[in-house]
Amino acid sequence: MASVAPAISGPHQYLQAQTRWSRVEIAFWLATLLPFVVAPNYLVLASQVAITALFALSLDLILGYAGIVSLGHAAFFGFGAYTAGIISKYGWGEPLSGLLISGIAAGLLGYLMSFVIARFRHLALIMITLGFGFLLLEAANSASWLTGGADGLQGVRMWPLLGIFKFDLWGVTSYWYSLIVLFLLFLVSRRLIHSPFGLSLRGIRENIVRMRAIGAESRAHLQKVYTISAAMAGIAGAVLTQTTETVSLGVLDFQRSADLLVMLILGGAGRLYGGIVGAILYMVARDQFSGINPQYWYFPIGVLLIAVVLFLPNGILGGLAKITASERLQKWMRTLPPWLRGAS
Amino acid sequence: MTTPVLSTRGLQKSFGSLVVASDIAIALPQGVRYALIGPNGAGKTTLINLMTGMLRADAGQILLGDDDITALGPEARVRRGLVRTFQINSLFPDLNALEAVTLAICEREGVSRTWWRPLSAYSGAVDEAYGILKSLMLAEVCYRHTRELAYGQQRLLEIAIALATRPKVLLLDEPAAGVPREESAELFAAVTNLSRDITVLFIEHDMDFVFRFASRIIVMVGGRILLEGTPEQISADPRVREVYLGGAHHG
Ligand SMILES: Nc1ncnc2c1ncn2[C@@H]1O[C@H](COP(=O)(O)OP(=O)(O)OP(=O)(O)O)[C@@H](O)[C@H]1O
Ligand SMILES: [Mg+2]
């Protein structure tokens, strides 16, 4: 997140400053604990938000950093969700190992897909990912002996987390669980984007032709990030299954991929927090709106999306970063006491 | 005679009926500063594309030292030390100069596969990147996004990124295109003062710079090599005067 840039004394200090935790970031993660106190009736929603945020983060890694457009990311979310559900249905309800297995399964699927993905860009990619999403949805629909088809997967029963915490109706365990998984995978992503590998991904996004001219292993990089992203999406799906104890075909729906893209664009792609902020705004707003007038939900979203793309091409976070980087604000910030400035 | 660092034999390329490279045979000895000149559309950029593997030749061979690299892809050729820059800036607009050069170094060293250690842990790579930027007068602006750099600085960054790959042979496609004259002179001085371990071939339209900075010159016309020689030989040759120097103004 944006913070006031400290004076740079050399390239090492500059790069270290890039990876430092800003106060805004720390405040943000502390604020994710607020629902337990302020909105204990909304923990189920909060848990859904955390899951979606994780899903959006997985898309940000490939879209925001490596520039791979995907309209079928729900394929991996759904694959993870079904894997977790089926394992549990057939007798293994331990959540953490279930999560791991689902992540590996989705990662493997992503790895296989990545051989195709790494060869294409732009419109071709949209079509391929879209087609792949439809394919998986139809496969899950017709394999009803395994997935329950349109009726959804019945009989998912999760054991208590760590053998102690039952998944309760109020979503206390669910939110803790989703939040911790989100935070851990956020840490992994944060590490990844500040690594040499993360730099190469941005290079691919910015100019893949030049990457060839410096001898970069672009294809291997793309395959790797796609696999990681697929595994993360699968884990997000698995958390959804485990916290709701059902799986429906909706986890593979095109709508889910499209909504995800909307959230990421709203929040700001390629900023790590963009997907998370987008997921929070989108899900909370949808919850509020659909209480009033569910059939009109996409009207304000449509307006908002157009407005953001027109006026904030880098999303809400991109707009905020621009404001905080402006001369006048910097001047004003310097008049504040240091602990308020957000710099560490 | 020692083996040339880079050579081609019978290189051939057509776009449909347009022949852009016809029986190209060149041989660049170690450490030389070559200029490749010729009127617009002569096929100079195409020749660089062929040598670096960005275009596939219809026929012929490309050798780096004693190795035939004709079948290798562009990335593999770069890793062996055959590196180019672009006539039209081909940079990373949203990376800053320090990141762009560090990126090339990390790819060269193979550390770009690492995703669990921060970039700042590779202080050797960072120092090297900063050193390259400094040598090209870019240290001051190295934290600025590439797209915010002045045009001349972007041209220098083109070269900085190429140098970060540790080239043996550096092919510069009009490195000073669009740069004001005084800055061009600085740029060419920086290029010719590079280590003699690096063999340089540059395309340039301005004859002053060509004669000042090249030790040998290749003249291309209509997809063929017309002539190859020292600046004295080239300037004295009547055919060159006719097709190139004497004719309409080019570049
Ligand atoms: N991909 C392509 N497809 C078809 N024709 C091409 C292609 N690339 C180049 N050409 C044509 O090949 C000829 C040689 O082009 P090239 O870019 O190599 O010229 P050049 O010597 O670099 O010229 P300049 O001095 O203008 O840069 C030109 O006539 C050009 O139009
Ligand atoms: Mg050219």
Image: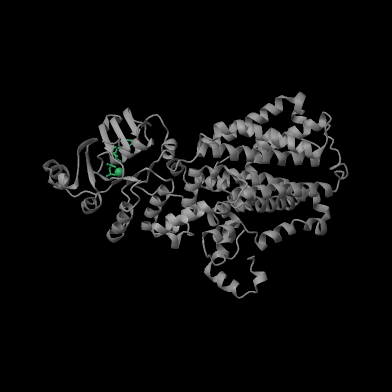
Which residue sits furthest left? Answer: B238
Residue situated in front as seen by the camera: A133 or A185: A185
> Could you tell me if residue B119 is visible in this image?
yes
Residue at left offset 58%, top offset 50%: A270
Where is residue A55 shown, x and y percent of the image?
Answer: 67, 44
Ligand 1 is in which quadrant of the figure? top left
Q: Which quarter of the rendered picture does the N terminus of chain B lie within? A: top left
Where is residue B95 shown, x and y percent of the image?
Answer: 49, 53
Where is residue B231 shown, x and y percent of the image?
Answer: 19, 47
Where is residue A143 shown, x and y percent of the image?
Answer: 72, 24
Check the image and report above or below for A216 versus B208: above
Which residue sits furthest front? Answer: B1
Residue situated in front as seen by the camera: B190 or A189: B190
> Could you tell me if residue A248 is visible in this image?
no
Query: Left or right: A287 with respect to B80?
Result: right
Check the image and report above or below for B165 versus B71: below
Residue at left offset 54%, top offset 48%: A199
